[in-house]
Image (tube, helix red, strand yellow):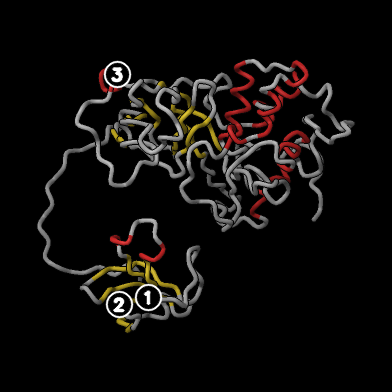
Amino acid sequence: MALVDPALGKFNPKAIRSLTPEVPWPGMWPKQECFRDGVPISHDYLLCSHAPEEQFGLYVIDRFGNREMLYLDPAIGSMCPTLFQKQTRPPVLPEMVDLDSDHGEFLVEDVYKGIEPQVQRGQARYLRVCQEVRAELEQLKNGAYRNDHPQFQDWYATPTHKVRGPYGWPSYVAKASLGIVPIEEDGSALFHAPAGKVLYFEILDRDFNELQRMRSVVQLQPGERRGCVGCHEPRNSVPTHHPPLALLRPPSELEPPPWGAVPFAYETVVQPVWDKQCVRCHDATDPKHIDLTGVLDADKVPASYRTLISQGWVHYMDYGWNSGGNEKRAPLTFGTVRSKLWKVLDKSHYDVKLSREDKRRVKCWVDLNCPLWPDYKFRGDRPGNVVAKD
């Protein structure tokens, strides 16, 4: 539990004063000495859920950190304290969901709000709609559903315990590029997007280089309409008084990538680029150990993927457990634009010239944070060599 003084600034650590300093934070709660669900009841007091051992009870805490138990049943935990008080009945709102639709609508008023001055007006050309692919429940032979994954990293979309590089863990979440839409001259974009999926957006330049990435996610209900002011704009930003250009036309439909709006598979989307352009020189015999073949090693990892990740040829956000790096990132500080791979390829490396589509394939993979597989199949069941014993 903590007190926050917004007057000291939204990003100032001194604005936070912990009332429970014995509990480490941030991160997942421990099994003991856990506090959550704070509810203020006056200037000096708050209610909360507290687990002094393994079970939660209801407590009152004052602003000095003193605490008193109100209720705790050792057999059944109690959480989410709620104040009972007289409330005005809220108005009945009209139904906002259209169950006959399979999509909703997004409006971004001005993508440049939040990415200027690092990104100049006119640079942003496309908005890419990305999906974090969910892991489907697995039904077991007894009819129950799997609720535990021993050796859990072997179920990841990338085996981060088997391959990582100087930038940490690549994405262990399966990703998909569902398509791109145009950005108007004033930075606005209006488009349809599928409902019921976990989505986030990327802003791209004319060459499909990622300029900024949405680092949270958003979902749509069928028929829902949502909007935002910009891309990582200040929290106190408000919409402008004039209508964005995108509102003067119907919503754009997503233009799927050439390989399809499906979960991204490195081996079928990116590896063919290396096979066509690179492996004639960069194979297992390369004296610089730059092996770009698709040969699988004992961990089921393609040689090219391991080379690019472990040698730091591509840049990505660190997905490592509790490794930090989840804060807001400035534009142009990650992904394709920071990858030394393109410093080589853009100089016509030994007359190697990738087509526009081939470049788009590789850049999309990098800016999806370099996922390997399109699903969460157990690594031992994937095709290839026998899994190496640890």
Q: Residues within 10 Å of mark 2 (few under 14, many from 20)?
A: some
Disc 2: which residue:
63
Could you say which disc has been placed on residue 19 in the image? 1
Q: Nearer the viewer, residue 151 or 42?
A: 42
Position of residue 134 relative to residue 342, above or below, is below
Quadrant position of residue 280: top right
What residue is drawn where x is 81% and y is 43%?
298
Position of residue 90 relative to residue 1, above or below, is above
Q: Secondary structure at mark 3?
A: loop
Question: In the rendered view, does 99 fall on the left or right side of 14?
Answer: left
Separation of marks 2 and 3 at Cα, in angstroms: 53 Å
Disc 3: which residue:
250
Q: Would you say the residues marked 2 and 1 are in contact, meaning their CB atoms lie under 8 Å apart?
A: yes
Separation of marks 2 and 1 at Cα, in angstroms: 7 Å
Q: Position of residue 14 (x, y in %)?
A: 39, 66
Question: In the rendered view, does 342 fall on the left or right side of 295?
Answer: left
Q: Position of residue 301 (x, y in %)?
A: 74, 39
Question: In the rendered view, does 52 fall on the left or right side of 271?
Answer: left
Viewer can see residue 2:
yes
What residue is drawn where x is 64% and y is 20%?
358
Question: In the rendered view, does 231 fall on the left or right side of 136?
Answer: left
| Amino acid at dot 3 | Pro
